Image: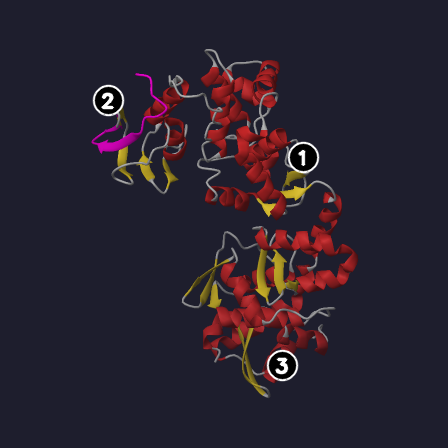
Amino acid sequence: MRPISTHEVFRFAAQSGEVEFKTLTDGSTFKVKVEMDGVSFYPKTGLGRPNSREFIARYVVLFNQEQSFVTTPFVKAKLRSASYFVALVKAMLEYMPPEKSTEEPTAPVAPVLPPDIEGQLLAFLQRSNQGGRVERNADFIAYYYGFRGHPLPTLEDTAAGDGRTRELARKIIETKFRERVKRDDLLGVFRAQEMLLSAVPLNADEFIDALRRMNLIVADCSPAGLLRLIHDVTDDKSVGIFNQDLYPTNSAQTIQQAKALFFIPVAGVKALRAVLRDAKTLPGQLGIAKFRFLEEKLGPESANQLKVVRRIVESSSQFWAKRDGEDLWYLCDERENTLINNLFKAHRVTGSCPMEKLAAALHRALKARALDYPVALPDVIGDYLRQCRYLEVRDGIGHFRKESCEAVELSPPQEAVRRALVEFGERGASLPALKEKLNAFTGEFSDATVQKAIMNSPIVCVSGNRGDRTYRLLTFATKCA
């Protein structure tokens, strides 16, 4: 390939199956064959007068192996294979002899960095290392920092994948990267760190998405690997990565087992863990709790921890949450919960039910409990039911997902109510008639127990006005006016 003058300007031209680079100074061309679904370049004529390094940094995603990418507003491409692009750009960066000039020497111009962190990392490794193993070492180091699909490779993983020993892997990373890198070499890492410190606690997926919007990430990247890079480049280890229970995820196994990952300040994480435990436990008896209830329980001395835990509750898949003005209704779907237990009891008597009737039945069941806090109203319960993993809602009817629902036994009074209402069928029964039927079944329950089993049961649908109510099994809820 011919040397490329730093003062030449390039023009792209798309042809079938190949991309042509053409210099405007002498008209010489060279082509790279790529497999592509389509490629477009803007503007169609002229690219200003950047030098070739600026041109490459701005208009080509350096070493990008992602199937589709957007480099800048000026160049968009969707490729099935970017390998030829990669080879060309590497060669262009490696062979750029200085321009001979009679002009007065000027101060050296700092290289223009690629916009993304991986590109900056690989460009730095290309510039700062010489010899026949530059490419191999660059890919090797990128793998260690999570840019090649592994959630968090150890030195042993990194060494084994490249046929090297653990000690050699450590030495390469230390001498080829850690000892040489400076702030100006990886500005993207410092931008990512600044964003992270301003937003913690932060869901790991949200962090990566934010970096994509900032064009700092263009391909797949491990959140834990990226945090390792931030630690090594900035020498600031104040933020760690933790699972949904706020335990550290310091291996590939713990990362893969985690249901959610969060970036959390390391200092004070033990106190945070205790508050999070309380947040998970509180909705157990209430079904759905307000976050204010937790604040009242723990008091103002836990205000800082509560702010962090609230952000976790709002962003973690293990919680369901709904804003209510400045407050928050929520429950933890992974803990023993009265509402979910009653939902499973409803599933014992029906496979589907109108959502309005199901929410009302569950609300009545929650009201039966003597609690220190008010229970959620039917509309809040309905919002949860429409998003929970136990139901599929179609046309206002909730259909239970059998594979998600646990087998829960009815209490003896509830089972007696079920048997009685099965005999009454679709027509249902008044309260006196239902009590009479129950007394015929058994006399072992007190009036208060029978009253509670009827009035506050998750399997009973109530219709009509006070003094003229009809009670039916949820199986016949569609008959309830």
Residue 252 shows in this picture: no
Q: Is residue 133 left or right of residue 325?
A: left
Q: Position of residue 178 (x, y in %)?
A: 60, 23
- Residue, disc 3: 436
Helix, strand or loop at label 3? It is: helix
Q: Is residue 413 magenta?
A: no
Q: Is residue 7 above or below residue 271?
A: above
> Which amino acid lies under the numbered mark 3 shown in the image of this protein?
Glu
Where residue 61 appears, as percent x and y from the top left, is 40, 32
In the rendered structure, find residue 312 and report the number of the disc placed on it. none
Residue drawn where x is 60% and y is 47% of the image: 202
In the current view of this chain or complex, which residue is farthest to the top? 132
Decide which of 432, 439 is in the foreground and name it.
432
Tell which circle, 2 or 1, labels the residue nearer the N-terminal end: 2
> In this picture, is 476 found above or below 225?
below
Q: Is residue 79 left or right of residue 195?
A: left
Assess whether mark 3 and mark 2 are in contact (beta carbons under 8 angstroms): no
- Front in this rendered view, residue 33 or 437: 33
Residue 3 falls within the magenta-colored stretch: yes
In the image, taking residue 246 as reference, residue 397 lies left or right, namely: left
Q: Which residues are magenta?
A: 1-22
Tell me the amino acid under the disc marked 2: Ser
Q: Which residue is mark 1?
A: 237
Relative to 430, residue 120 above or below: above
The picture places residue 369, in percent across and down from the top left corner, at 70, 69
Q: Residues within 10 Å of mark 1 (few under 14, many from 20)?
A: few
Q: Which residue is mark 2?
A: 28
- Tell me the crowding category of disc 2: few under 14, some 14 to 19, or many 20 or more residues within 10 angstroms, Cα based: few
